[in-house]
Amino acid sequence: MAENADAQGSEKVSLGSELIIPVAALFFTIYYFITIWHAPWTAQVAAFIVGDILLLLVALILIKSYRTYKAGGGELNFDNLIRPKSYVPKRLGLLALTVGYVFIVPSLGFTITTFLFLSMAMLLLSEGKKKRFILAISLSLSLGGYLLFIVAFKTRFPAGPFENFMKGFF
């Protein structure tokens, strides 16, 4: 029995590492619900649909993690965050890009900042390969986000040069 536990011990899942994003998503969704409370009803409906789906997914992940932990297949640690060591610089780069996004979005606005973030993040992760494809995807996603959230749902995202220029068209 002890041998079997040792064999399984090397294969245990690092549940703490896997739960960082779901827990962050839970807090983001709660924050999102609070901030859209006085938004137009169309934005509220969309927000609650997306938020409810996100909460359902978080609940499913938490249930799965709890079952894994109870079955002895996981540990509440953060080992996967520092292993393999070759991923650490990319992870720190993504963290820096995310923090930068939060501080730059009020100045450059949603669309430009989202384009820059997506471009730099994908270039970082792909190690600079397929630059044209990445730039095209980033442009499509940021313009799509602009059209969906700002034009269609009239969400009050930070306005920058692009949003101010486009006000005359919509």
Image (spheres, helix red, strand yellow):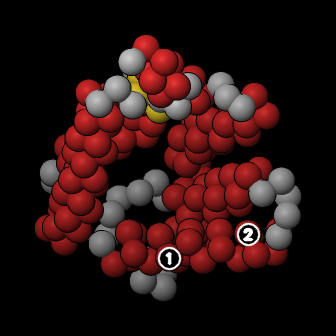
Dot 1 falls on a residue whose secondary structure is: helix
The label nearer to you, 2 versus 1, is 2
Location of residue 120 (image quadrant): bottom right
- The vertical placement of 97 against 153, above or below, is above
Does 87 sit left or right of 145 as displayed? right
Q: Nearer the viewer, residue 20 or 150?
A: 20
Q: Is residue 40 something that shows in the picture?
A: no
Query: Mark on residue 8?
Result: none
Residue 100 vs residue 161, the one in the foreground: 100
Q: Residue at horizontal 34%, vertical 26%?
A: 72
In the rendered view, tell whether residue 109 sits above or below residue 95.
below
**Mark 2 → mark 1, Cα distance in angstroms:** 15 Å
Q: Measuring 83% from the left and 53% from the top, which residue is drawn there?
A: 127
Q: Earlier in the sequence, mark 2 or mark 1?
A: 2
Residue 157 appears in the rendering: yes
Which label belongs to residue 134? Answer: 2
Q: Amino acid at mark 1?
A: Gly
Tag 2 secondary structure:
helix
Which percent across, then down, holds residue 146? 48, 71
**Which quarter of the picture shows residue 93?**
top right
Image location (x, y in percent) of residue 122: 70, 58
Mark 2: few, some, or many residues within 10 Å (few <14, many ≥20)?
some
Pinpoint residue 58: horizontal percent, then vertical percent.
Answer: 28, 46
Please identify the residue farthest to the top as the structure is shown. 2
Q: Residue at x 20, y 65 (%)?
A: 49
Between 160 and 59, the one nearer to me in the picture? 59
Q: Quadrant of the N terminus?
A: top left
Please give the residue where the numbered disc 1 appears in the rendered image: 144
Around disc 1, counting alpha carbons within 10 Å, would you say few (fewer than 14), some (14 to 19), or many (20 or more)?
some
Left/right placement of residue 75 relative to residue 95 reads left
- The quadrant of the picture occupied by the C terminus is bottom left
Question: Which amino acid type corresponds to the residue marked 2 in the rendered image?
Answer: Ile
